[in-house]
Amino acid sequence: MKKILVVDDNEGILDVLSIILEGEGYEVQQIIEPEKVLNLGSDLPDLILLDIWMSGADGRVICRHLKDQPKTKHVPVLLMSANKDIAEIAEEASADGYIAKPFEMEELIEMVGRFVNKSAG
């Protein structure tokens, strides 16, 4: 079962994303405290969905850190934001892609599937 890590400081967003993704057959882990993403163990997810604006943390900085670490640089990271410049922000942060909020359920599922299946193997 493919594992997706969802990082957001909004419990409602975490719950909605978990329900959608679990319904698609993914194992979902949630982190509400952004700094915990920097301490992932050896059991890495197949994909990280990372909000950009979180209290006390900047998802762009976290994304860059993950992409700079040999252990986590191969894990796809999709940034999530309602910012109209999300495409540029994702590129600057070295993210693999982005999901604009509010998102359509089908768009989310398609985007997640694209990256999770790319990382298979």
Image (tube, grey):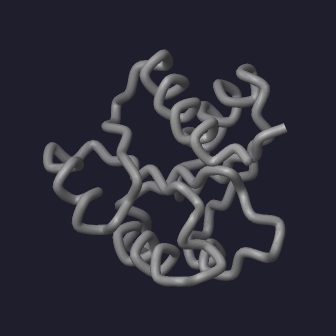
In percent of width and height, residue 102 lies at 34, 30
Q: Is residue 66 left or right of residue 53?
A: right
The x and y percentages for residue 86 are 23, 49
The vertical placement of 65 against 10, above or below, is: below
Residue depicted at x 29% and y 57%: 90
Residue 112 vertical placement versus 80 (above, below)? above
Q: Residue at x 69, y 81 (%)?
A: 39
Residue 85 location in percent, x, y? 14, 49
Q: Nearer the viewer, residue 44 or 23?
A: 44
| In the image: residue 39, left or right of residue 70 | right
Residue 109 placed where, x, y %? 54, 24
Say which quarter of the image contains residue 74. Answer: bottom right
Judged left or right of residue 76, residue 23 is: right
- State the residue lying farthest toward the top: 106
Q: How many marks?
A: 0
- Picture quarter containing residue 64? bottom left
Is residue 11 shown left or right of residue 83?
Answer: right
Residue at 67% from the left image edge and 30% from the top image edge: 21
Can you say which quadrant of the picture contains the N terminus? top right
16 over 53 or under it: above or below: above
